[in-house]
Amino acid sequence: MGTIDISTLHLLLGLLLMAVPVYFLWKYKTGIVRSTVTAVVRMVVQMFLVGLYLKYLFIWDNPWLNTAWVVIMIYVASETSLTRTKLKRKMMMLPLIIGFFVASVTIGLYFLGVVLQLDNVFNAQYFIPVFGILMGNMLGVNVIGLNVFYYNLMREKNSYYYLLGNGATTDEATAPFVKQALIRAFSPAIANMAVMGLVALPGTMIGQILGGSTPDVAIKYQMMIIVITISASMISLMLTLNLSKRITFDDMGRINNPFK
Amino acid sequence: MNETLYIDNIVVAYDDKTIIHNFSLQVGKGETIAVTGASGCGKSSLLKAILGIVPIKAGNINLSGMELSAHNIYAFRKKTAYLPQELTFPCEWVHEMIALTFGIKANRGKENRKLLHTYLNKLSLDSDICEKRLSEISGGQRQRIMIAVAALTNKDFILLDEPTSALDKESARKVLDFLNSLDNKPGIIAVTHDAEFASHCSRVVDISKYMYNGNN
């Protein structure tokens, strides 16, 4: 059972459905019609480019090339995190890169090597999509987690200094803020996991079924994808937070403003 | 061990702006010092400087033979309790707010809970207040709870920033009586605008004359 291709004409017919949300956004003068249309155009262009380079990555299937692609993804994810959190580059860039790298490599290779038992873990068919989905999820969690942690810490600086002044170490005094960041960053994923298959059929599973896999294989991949994305996101966020704390706090525990 | 806090000729500055110039003070355990002065003269900054939260550009601070430095900052702060004037907590309940301080002291348990309730009662608070939401209690209640918690941590020195700012005269007097009645009484430095409160302290230090004006 193969996947039915979509011709350019029919793809355009499908894209026409965007007229419905655009109409209501225009009717209620939301002011985001232009950005919505721009987003659609960007999506189409970017996806065609992704399709093109993925096609060649799959044809060449070269471990060095695949690894280089992951390195580029880590850099782009780190840059995007900086832009979306408005945190200072000199304080956050290195912790972000290390967090993304360590989390994606350990979890990605564990999944490909230990769980899937691939002879060649760099096989593009598995390596590229697994690292891609890890990176996307880690990015979302890092942006929320870092934002919540540093925003709340700066807003409630007095309570941090209160704890410090009462004998807490920097790690102890920041623990309430780490807790808030973890709750905000992971609640959506945990809530989704709890209703998976009941309220919505998840993307990976649908993709696999459309691609020809049987449902019993698709559900196993779906479960694994959820687990590896949450695990990698946790490792990435905790590493980034802990490494960045070494830079954002001085040796007396004082906070250096991490925002631009 | 001589449990004394020595502040020797300190200069306190935020970046390039000097706040306090050449200030010295000696506080023994058991003493209660009121630090007074006009708004903005650096009273709160003095407490923060003692804790190493605000940098000192010159001079020394020494607590029970331990000099304030990056090398021993956490051991230094283990000997202090601190209550800032404005405090927002990253939690919802009073018992969570208390647990935050207890958590770092690791001295939870029945005995401390009992002592906390005794302290709360001495400060005219019902122990049921621990089960309320932070949004349900007044600023004065919050202030007294945190003073009880500061006392409970059993530190050598307590630094209080405007501890009676949300209290009426009677409650303010009760707070002072409570602090003075503590067993193994700590040294207390209280920044205050409350002349009545200050008049009942062992000493009053006016910090205004150490305010940096560009000439001193």
Image: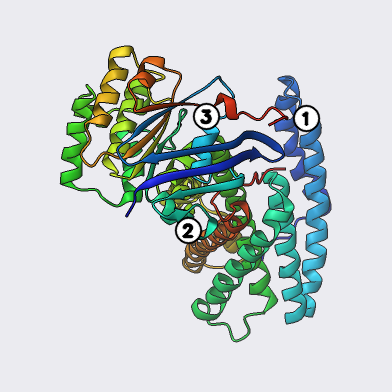
Q: Nearer the viewer, residue A57 or B98?
A: B98
The answer to whether marks 1 and 3 sit on the same chain is: no
Chain for disc number 3: B
Q: Looking at the rendering, which quadrant does residue B18 occupy?
A: top right
Q: Looking at the rendering, which quadrant does residue A23 occupy?
A: top right
Identify the amino acid type marked 3: Lys
Residue at (41% x, 16% y) in the render? B195
Q: What's the distance in space between the residues labelled 3 and 2, CA to CA? A: 24 Å
- Write down the residue under mark 1: A33
Say if residue B95 shows up in the picture.
Answer: no
Q: Nearer the viewer, residue B21 or B78?
A: B21
Q: What's the distance in space between the residues labelled 1 and 3, CA to CA? A: 54 Å
Quarter containing the C terminus of chain B: top right
Say if residue B52 shows up in the picture.
Answer: yes
Residue A46 placement (x, y as % from top left): 80, 54
Q: Nearer the viewer, residue A203 or B54?
A: B54
Vertical placement of residue A188 versus A7, above or below:
above
Identify the amino acid type marked 2: Asn
Q: Nearer the viewer, mark 1 or mark 3?
A: 3
Q: Looking at the rendering, which quadrant does residue A213 occupy?
A: bottom right
Q: Does A12 sit left or right of B188 as displayed?
A: right
Numbered mark located on residue B72 in the image: 2
Which SS class for mark 2?
A: helix
Residue A86 placement (x, y as % from top left): 70, 44
Which SS class for mark 1?
A: helix
Residue A173 placement (x, y as % from top left): 45, 48
Q: Does B113 sit left or right of B62 as displayed?
A: left
Which SS class for mark 3?
A: helix
Residue at (59% x, 49% y) in the render? A146
Earlier in the chain: of badge 3 and badge 2, it is: 3
The answer to whether marks 3 and 2 sit on the same chain is: yes
- Write down the residue under mark 3: B43
